Amino acid sequence: MKAQYQKIIMNEGVSFIAKKLEFPRFDSEFHFHAEYELKYVLHSKGKRFVGDSVENFKEGDLVLLGSNIPHYWKNDPIYFEKDDLLASAYLIMFSEDFLGHNFFHLPEMAPIKTLLNKAKGGVCFGNKDKCGIPKKMKQLLSSEGPSRIIILLDILFDLAKAEIVPLLTETFVSEIPMLNYSDHSLKRMTKVHEYVIENFRNKIEVQDVASIANMTSHAFCKYFKKSTKKTFMTFLGELRICHAKKLLIEKEEMAIADICYASGFDNLSNFNRKFRSITDLTPTEFRSNYIKDTV
């Protein structure tokens, strides 16, 4: 079954969406749509799932996604346990041709066209490149008429000059047009994500997750690899390292061994090996580099 896109409805009289999101938590299902999406997180923390990428997010997270990339933001468990917390973000959504089919092919638009091409694989931006972007996104919310277009182009031009960090692997990006998600498949992947988020600190077997997806272990492994371009165990390991990085940053007093076990690893040497394979750093080096950058 051909995947059904999330239909984005534009209000009458506007060519793109610009709004502020405010919820008790971010808890949408795994979804995708034809429009580009620029999202700046104002408040809340959690895990960001974009295609085959899983990363921590917090206040200041700024991401630009191209068309048809499956994604969702999932808040930390505390947001589901307390009712007095807030998840908020600025959101802009636009189609590639919202200004006409050839607008971004104009010579003056070359930097933005390059940005949009890179965003087809999803990109995020470093702290030093976000200066002024939140203010302009807020200004955009109350703008009308031609000013909306001018401010959006100004935002995109700023981002075009920024340092970009790719989110997705080349393999995943190359096969985005071939991905064949059905609505049922997206809901199944959401269930898998939610189960793993709740249980990654404990031992997880493939058959445990396969049962959540109502599949045999063999069928689930094939399905997961086809959908994400990686094995389930690779995904689980990356999620655990993602959590370990969060603890290394937020819990400076916590010993490396304690972080290892709190992230779902039962072997310190395996944890160190996996951490280095993903980050090119040891856990100690990662923590030291972060402390150095924030001093």
Image: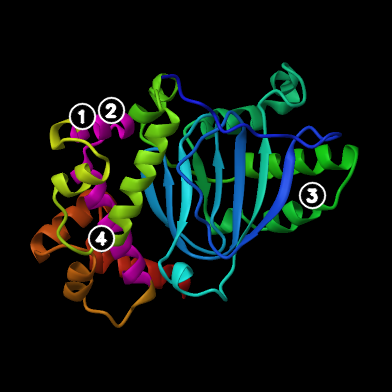
Q: Which residue is mark 3?
A: 140
- Identify the mark nearer the N-term, 2 or 4: 4
- Identify the mark nearer the N-term, 3 or 4: 3
Look at label 3 and name its amino acid.
Leu
Note whether 44 is above or below 254 in the view shown. above
Look at label 2 and name its amino acid.
Lys
Which marked residue is nearer to the observer: mark 3 or mark 4?
Answer: 4
Q: Which residues are magenta?
A: 220-249
Q: Which residue is mark 2?
A: 226
Picture quadrant where residue 177 is located:
top left
Note whether 12 is above or below 280 in the view shown. above
Mark 2–mark 3 Cα distance, whole angstroms, equals 39 Å
Residue drawn at x 57%, y 61% as measured from the top left:
60
Mark 2–mark 1 Cα distance, whole angstroms, equals 6 Å
Quadrant (top left/top right/bottom left/bottom right) for the N terminus = top left
Asked whether 224 falls inside the magenta stretch, the response is: yes
Mark 1–mark 3 Cα distance, whole angstroms, equals 44 Å
Q: Nearer the viewer, residue 183 or 91?
A: 183
Give left or right: position of 243 versus 18: left
Q: Are marks 2 and 4 in contact (CB under 8 Å)?
A: no
Q: Nearer the viewer, residue 11 or 150?
A: 11
Q: Which residue is mark 1?
A: 222
Give left or right: position of 27 versus 16: left
Is disc 1 placed on a helix, strand or loop? helix
Q: Which residue is mark 4?
A: 199
Is disc 2 placed on a helix, strand or loop? helix
Q: Are marks 2 and 1 in contact (CB under 8 Å)?
A: yes
Residue drawn at x 27%, y 41% as measured from the top left:
213
